[in-house]
Amino acid sequence: MKEEIDARRPTNNLVRDNFQYQTVESYMCTNCHATVLKQQENICWFVSVPRRQDTEAPTLQDALRLSMRPDGRQLLCQHCRHDECRVTTKISQLPRTLIVQLNRYVFLGEESKKVRANVGNPKLLSLNEHVADDVTRPPEWKCTKPALCILSDFEESEAPSSGPSPPSAARGLSPVPATAGLPESAAADSPVSAGAAASEVCSWELGDTNQPPSFKTPTSALKLGHALKKAAEVGVGLAARAEDAERGSRLEDYIRLHQREWGDKISHAALSTLDLRKMNLQDALPLTEDLVQLSNSLREQIGEVATNLAGAHSCNEETKLYNELVTLTSASVTVFNKRRGGESARLLLETYVNRRRGAANKDIASTLSPLERKLAEKMDLVEVLGKRKRRVPIILAPFMRNAMDLIVRMRPRMSLRGNPYIFAKAKSKSYVPGWAAIKSACGTCDLKKLELITSTKIRKYLATVTQVLQLDEQQLEWVANHLGHSLDVHRQFYRLPSEILQLTKVSQLLLAAEQGCISSYKNKSLNDLDVKG
C-alpha cells in the first residue's frame, strides 16, 4: 500500500522546491555563554517597516537587516538558570523564490496602527550578511517562462522588466523574490498538483477500514490551504495587470477547484487528525499548591524589592531593582487575574494613572455583603483591550497597587520617555512580555510542576475548578467576561472535563439508572444523589 501511495506522489514538491528556505537560530546565554541551535523552515519572510534614516526613505534591504539583527530575549538557561540570552539568526538554505511580506501594522498600547511610510524596492537584495557560512544553494532552477510582474507598492516604472534569475552564488545576490512565476511544468497542472504537494509536505498517510486518512503535521496542511488560495487570488490580480488572460483563467479555475475540493480532500483529514490526537490526551493543569506558593512568593519578593529600591545606594543598583520590581509585579498581576500574558503586560501608564476611583453606585453598594463592600474599597480595577478588541478587566490588589505606584514614581529616573507601558524595563522601548515575567518568577520558586505554569494553563485552571461551584448562568458569564472570552468559548475550550467529577457525579447517575431508582430522586440535583454501588 505504501509503495502505491509513493508512486502517486509527484516527484517535485511545488511549495518546498520553489519557496521553502531554512534558518538557524542561535540562543546564547549572556551569563555562561551556553549556546542552543534551533532550525526553522519557512516559506515567507515577514519584515517590519524600518524607521526613516535622515531624509532618505528606508528600503526593503533595511527591513531585512532590521529583522535579522541580534535580539535579546528572556529565556531560562538550562545550565546556569540565567533568564537572558542573545539570539542571532542566519539563513542556512536559500529558496528559489524568496517571498517577503512587509508588515505595516504595529500595536501601540490598546490600538493597532498602520505605518504608511514609503519603502524603497531595490532590483536586487544582498543576502551576504544574512546567510550562514555553510549555506545550501536552492534546487536547480528550471523556470522557462518570465514572471508576470513584481509585487510592489510602487509605480510600474520602478519594476524591473526581466524575469527571475537564479542566485549567482550561494552567498551572492538574490533577485527581488516577489514574483508570481512558477516552473512551466508546475503551472500547467497546478490546480491538481497543489493538493498532492501539500500532502507530501505535511506527510499525508492513507488510512484503511480501521484508520482514517491523517497528516503528521495537520496544522501545516490547514495553513497551506489558506496560503495557496490567497496566492492564487493575488495571481489573478497580477495576471489582470499583465493582460495575461490565459494564466488568469487557470488561476480562477484553481480557486474554484480549491473551494470545492480542498475541504474534503485536505482540511477534513487534517481536522480529524487534530481531533483524534486530542482525544484522551492528558491536558494537565497547574498544581494548586504550586499556584499558592507562587502567589505567596511573588507577594513577598515584591515587598522585599520595593524596600530595597527605596534604599538603593547607586544608579546601577537602582536600575537593577527597578527592572526586577517591574517583572515581579507584571507576573503577579497576570497570575492573580488569570489574564493572557500580553493583555496585562500591555497595560498603559496613562490607563493606570487615570483609572476610575471612588465609591460604587449607592444602589449597587446597598446590595453587597460586608465582605464585598470591603473588597470594593480595597481593590482597584482597570480595563484593557483584549482579544478581538474585547474590553477585559484587571483587578489590582493593594500590594500590587503600591508596587505600581512606586514604579510610576521611579519612571522619570529610568530613561523611559516615549515608552507608554507601565511594565517597561529601564531604557527600553517596549514592555516586559507576560510569559517572560512568569517564567522569571517561577525560576525563583521550588515548584513541583514548573512546566505547567503558563498563562494559558492558569486560565484553564480557573475555568475548570469553578465547576465545583454551583454557578448560575449570570455568574458563569461574569467569569467568562473576566477571562476575556464568550460563554460558549469558555465551555468548549477552557472548562476542561474533570475526571473526578465524571467519576463521582455521573457515575452515581449511572448507578441509579442501573438500579432503577432514578424516579425516587425527582427534582433533585446530582449533588443530592446518594446511591449505594
Image: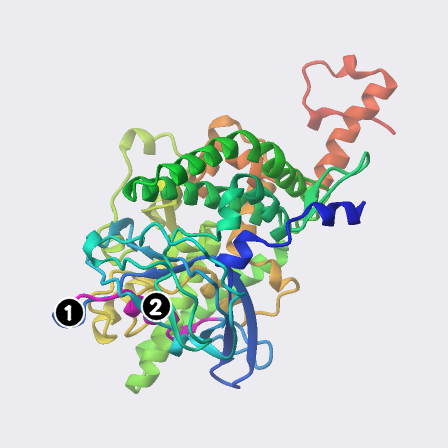
Q: Position of residue 51 (x, y in %)?
A: 22, 66
* Residue 59 on the magenta span: yes
Residue depicted at x 44% and y 57%: 44
Q: Is residue 393 above or below residue 54?
A: above
> Tag 2, which secondary structure?
helix
**Label 2, residues with CA under 10 Å away: few <14, some 14-19, many ≥20:** many
In this orientation, which residue lies closer to the viewer: 319 or 159? Answer: 159
**Label 1, residues with CA under 10 Å away: few <14, some 14-19, many ≥20:** few
- What type is the residue that disc 1 sits on? Glu
* Residue 124 on the magenta span: no
Q: Position of residue 486 (x, y in %)?
A: 46, 34
> Tag 1, which secondary structure?
loop
Q: Is residue 83 visible?
A: yes
- What type is the residue that disc 2 sits on? Leu
Residue depicted at x 20% and y 69%: 417
Mark 2 to mark 1: distance in Å? 17 Å
Locate the N terminus and report the quarter of the image it occupies: top right
Q: Position of residue 144 (x, y in %)?
A: 45, 56
Magenta stretch bounds: 56-74
Check contact, mark 2 vs mark 1: CB within 8 A.
Answer: no
Q: Position of residue 344 (x, y in %)?
A: 38, 54
Mark 2, residue position: 64
Mark 1, residue position: 56
In this orientation, which residue lies closer to the viewer: 205 or 109? Answer: 205
Residue depicted at x 54% and y 58%: 17
